[in-house]
Image: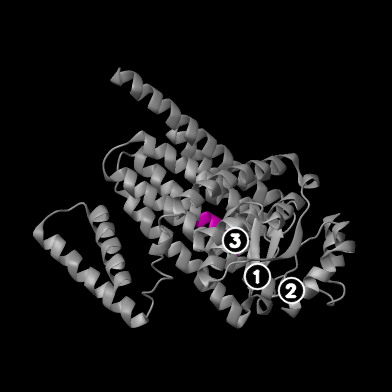
Amino acid sequence: MIFDLDIIRELISALFLFMGSFLCISGGVGILRFPDFYTRMHAVGVTDTLAAAMILIGLMLQNPDGLVVIKLSLILLMTLFINPTASHALAKAAFHNGLMPLIEKNKKNNSLPDKKQESEKG
Amino acid sequence: MRHTLTLFVTLTVFWLLNSGHNTVLMTLLGLVSIIFVLYVAHKMDVVDHESQPVHLSLKFPGYFLWLLKELVLANISVVKSIWLGNSTISPCLMTIKSSQKTDLGIVIYANSITITPGTVSVDLIGDRITVHSLFKENIEFLKAGEMDRRVTELES
Amino acid sequence: MLIAATLAVLVVMLLAIIRTVIGPTLYDRILAVNMFGTKTILLLSLLGFVMGRPEFLDIAIVYALINFISVIAVLRYSDSFEFGSKTGEKTAENRIPQSGERLELGNKEAE
């Protein structure tokens, strides 16, 4: 019975690792394919959140006892808390130094310019 | 005082989990470094309800689970558009209003926006957050205000 | 599966390096370097399991902190000195004509 559980655990772990690798590679392709800086940032967001979480959970299932799990969840928590801060700092620095994002074509005619002025006013 | 105690407990747990040694010398060294960190933190004047948000700890797990669900959904849509190509994205930049009262609430809201793939909070002035989003649907989701409402509930 | 995941992370690191080299603006490069750092954390954790040495996790934790500090430091530096424009980078200033035309620019490049 215990042997069976171990096999199931290994399988679930492999599944998580596979999903994590797939999401990682998707993010890596996204950072090359997307057209400008701000959209690339979303691709990096994929690898920073769900891909990292999947791989770390897969590793947790590989060795589910002792301090290893706690350390892995610590890494996971740190990744989840630190990366949005770094992304926001990066986006803010880029925006304040005047890097403008690409905007979709039909969007700019109606609502965007007003919004832009509002944000500059505030 | 309450926040100093929380910080002390957090640091002690962190040390014990990370060191893995249980000898007297190691524990004493840990105690010394924890007290040093407490001293430095007091000198920097960062020990308060913002760095130690204990008043949120009861409601936080529920919010975190909801955020995790949104995270997975947003990841799926972004990955889909990565593989389908650039024609499927519709990037836009918008300013949305947040209804939180405290700075901590606004920071939690902005970070929740940033951590969700597909939306990045670019700028934050007062209670207005400028958001860059990969899809129009994401902006509409934020404008519908469910995340805003949940964060406001969290901080109250 | 562990080795496959390690290889996948290595491939992603390679893609990040490509973006670092070709990235048109300074911020693309910083973004790619940040991503490279996150992937290094994952790689360290994975390598610890592949080689059977979980002590690597401690290094991964320390690396996570250092990576964050380094990104914030570089951004601070770029905020206060704007070193991008001096080194002949294709920075934001080259891409933005006038304030009225800001939004037009994106559409030209989108096509």
Q: B36 above or below B145?
A: below
- Structural distance between the alpha carbons of marks 3 and 2: 25 Å
The amino acid sitting under disc 3 is Leu
Which residue is label 3 attached to?
C31
Density class for disc 2 (Cα within 10 Å; few <14, some 14-19, many ≥20) is some
The one nearer the camera, C107 or C36, is C107
Q: Are marks 1 and 2 in contact (CB under 8 Å)?
A: yes
Vertical placement of B21 versus B77: above or below? below
Q: Secondary structure at mark 3?
A: helix
Give the alpha-carbon distance from disc 1 to disc 2, as whole Å. 9 Å
Q: Is residue C33 magenta?
A: yes
Q: Which mark is residue B145?
A: none
In the rendered image, residue A76, in percent from the top left (x then y), is placed at 43, 50
What is the distance, in whole Å, between disc 1 and disc 3 at their CAs? 17 Å
Q: Which residues are magenta?
A: C30-37
Based on the picture, tell me whether residue B45 belongs to the magenta stretch: no
In this view of the protein, can residue B78 be seen by the observer? yes
Labels 1, 3: one chain: no
Mark 1 or 3: the one toward you: 1
Are the residues at dot 3 and dot 2 in contact (C-beta closer than 8 Å)?
no
Q: Quadrant of residue A91?
A: bottom right
Determine the secondary structure under disc 2.
helix
**Residue picked out by circle 2:** A119
Q: Chain of mark 2?
A: A
**Residue C13 seen:** no
Q: Which residue is mark 1?
A: B123
Q: Nearer the viewer, residue B84 or A109?
A: A109
Q: Chain of mark 3?
A: C
The image shows residue C51 at horizontal and vertical percentages of 33, 39
Amino acid type at image mark 1: Asp
